[in-house]
């Protein structure tokens, strides 16, 4: 993945696509893949009939829900995806001002490229962290995480313990101001060509990367 290329981050619950983000590659280095997600980027997520984001839903309801395409409107974000790590770390910026880190706990990402579109697939684990600029942190979405644990199509109690242990490890890193919470990229200024878009439909139709046969 070269700098400036568009790649699609896809998030699954089980085998069901629940969210997709169009991102632009900033750099690839031994530290991981750094992606840029500016406001206005292509974005898709599952919505309940009332228009709210789906939470605490049985997996059969998730399978039936429509994926609605819109635009990313939260904050500009730098996203670090590290090989083999069960998380991604996001730097949130509001008009260039660093607001803190968001830690998404997730299955290690798997890369794919179909010759037209490339992407990274992961399974979202619901539980997240928000880390303030001073290194203090708090859990997010604990109720949703507890609700899903042990339910069909989600994760077992043993898997849930591993997810929470990953979160505790990152909380310690944040409190000790270790990378990626050491100030790196907090003053980043990313050149902003047009926000990346979700183009075509291959990103939507493609099965999860881990469900496809691997080459012999």
Image (cartoon, grey):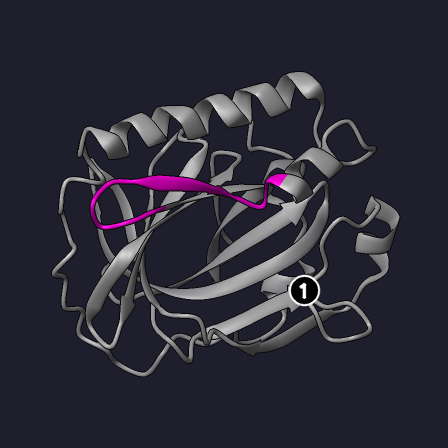
Say which residue appears at 19% left-offset and 35% top-offset.
179
Q: Mark yes or no: residue 61 visible.
A: yes
> For this view, does 82 lie left or right of residue 73?
left
Q: Residue at x 52, y 26 (%)?
A: 164
Q: Which residues are magenta?
A: 131-142
Left or right of residue 166: residue 55: right
Q: Categorize mark 1 by other alpha carbons within 10 Å: few (<14), some (14-19), many (20+).
A: few
Q: Residue at x 40, y 31 (%)?
A: 85
Residue nearer the viewer, 24 or 77: 77
Q: Locate residue 31, reporting x and y percent.
A: 21, 37
Residue 101: x %, y % from top left:
31, 50
| Above or below 11: residue 76 | below
The percent position of residue 93, horizontal first and vertical second, equals: 27, 66
Position of residue 141 relative to residue 195, above or below, is above
* Left-right relation of 182 to 214: left
In-front residue for pair 85/105: 105
Q: What residue sits right under mark 1 in the picture?
A: 53
């Amino acid at each position: 993945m070269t700098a400036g290329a568009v790649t699609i981050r896809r998030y699954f619950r089980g085998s069901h696509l629940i969210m997709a983000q169009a991102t632009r590659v900033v750099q690839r280095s031994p530290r991981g893949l750094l992606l840029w997600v500016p406001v206005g980027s292509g974005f898709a997520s599952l919505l309940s009939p009332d228009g709210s984001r789906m939470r605490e839903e049985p997996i059969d309801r998730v399978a039936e829900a429509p994926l609605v395409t819109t635009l990313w409107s939260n904050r500009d974000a730098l996203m670090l995806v590290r090989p083999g790590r069960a998380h991604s770390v996001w730097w949130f910026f509001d008009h260039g001002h660093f607001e803190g880190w968001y830690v998404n706990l997730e299955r290690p990402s798997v890369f794919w490229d179909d010759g037209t579109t490339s992407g990274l697939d992961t399974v979202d684990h619901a539980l997240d962290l928000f880390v303030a600029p001073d290194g203090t942190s708090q859990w997010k979405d604990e109720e949703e995480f507890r609700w899903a644990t042990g339910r069909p199509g989600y994760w077992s109690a043993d898997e849930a313990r591993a997810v929470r242990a990953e979160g505790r490890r990152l909380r310690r890193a944040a409190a000790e101001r270790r990378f990626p919470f050491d100030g790196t990229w907090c003053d980043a200024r990313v050149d902003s060509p047009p926000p990346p878009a979700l183009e075509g439909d291959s990103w939507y139709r493609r099965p999860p990367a881990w469900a496809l046969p691997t080459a012999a």
